[in-house]
Amino acid sequence: MNWSMLPNFITLLRVVLLVPLSLLLLDENYTYALMLFIVAGFSDALDGFLAKHFSWVSRFGAIVDPLADKALLVVTMTILVINGVLSWTLLIVVAIRDIFIVAGAYYYHYRLGPYKMQPSYLSKFNTFIQLLLVSGLLVSLGYHPIPPTFITVLIWLTYFTTVSSGVHYGVVWGKKFKQELQLKKESQHGNDEADKAGENSGEGESAG
């Protein structure tokens, strides 16, 4: 066995866990859903540790791992909304923010080519708050009730960090896009001028 592939295997296992987790949530079996959610969270920490500690980093893992984390949150939140635990408004706000970022990233890549996007600290905090909210709800529903005030605070924090991180991405990457686009145009203009100069030089030599 190629041990360097172990983090990828753990990531794929986390994706597979989404199936039984979804079924348990739809059945409102929150105790076992909480257990699976904890296992999925532990697997995320484990594959991250292995990848960094042993340098078992791969292109596949870099792409699939954050997608698996996002899928875990989105699926859990969506079913909690369906079950009437969370509001549709919150899910819609989260979805719009994610679609906005993905669409912007696609357009950036389409116009300017490959790039490396690192999540901002605000975005990481937003993910942490969402994770804390979902975990708190599952604990409250499947293990021990948590004060409603705490859940309410987390919900409003999710609203705030979701909107603010979306705006932050738009401002930062919008500015970066304009700068890179301007540099690309200037570079293209310089190449065109060089091509014209070369053509003129060639014509002059032919005439001579």
Image: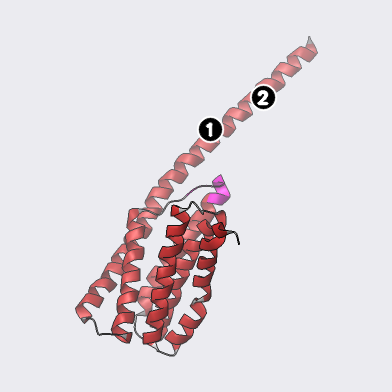
Q: Tell how many labels.
A: 2
SS at mark 2 in the image: helix
Identify the disc placed on residue 186.
Answer: 1
Q: What are the residue bounds of the magenta stretch?
A: 109-116
Which residue type does callout 1 highlight? Glu
Structural crowding at the residue carrying mark 1, measured as other residues with C-alpha within 10 Å and reported as few (<14), some (14–19) or many (≥20): few
Out of 96 and 145, give the one closest to the viewer. 145
**Nearer the N terminus, badge 1 or badge 2?**
1
Q: From where the camera sits, is residue 47 visible?
A: yes
Structural crowding at the residue carrying mark 2, measured as other residues with C-alpha within 10 Å and reported as few (<14), some (14–19) or many (≥20): few
Q: Mark 2 points at which residue?
A: 196
Residue 110 magenta-highlighted: yes
Pick the quarter of the image with the N terminus: bottom right
Residue found 42% across the figure and 79% down from its top: 36
Q: From where the camera sits, is residue 95 visible?
A: no
Relative to residue 129, is residue 111 depicted above or below? Answer: above
Relative to residue 112, is residue 1 depicted above or below? Answer: below
Residue 111, given in percent of the width and then of the height, sits at 56, 47
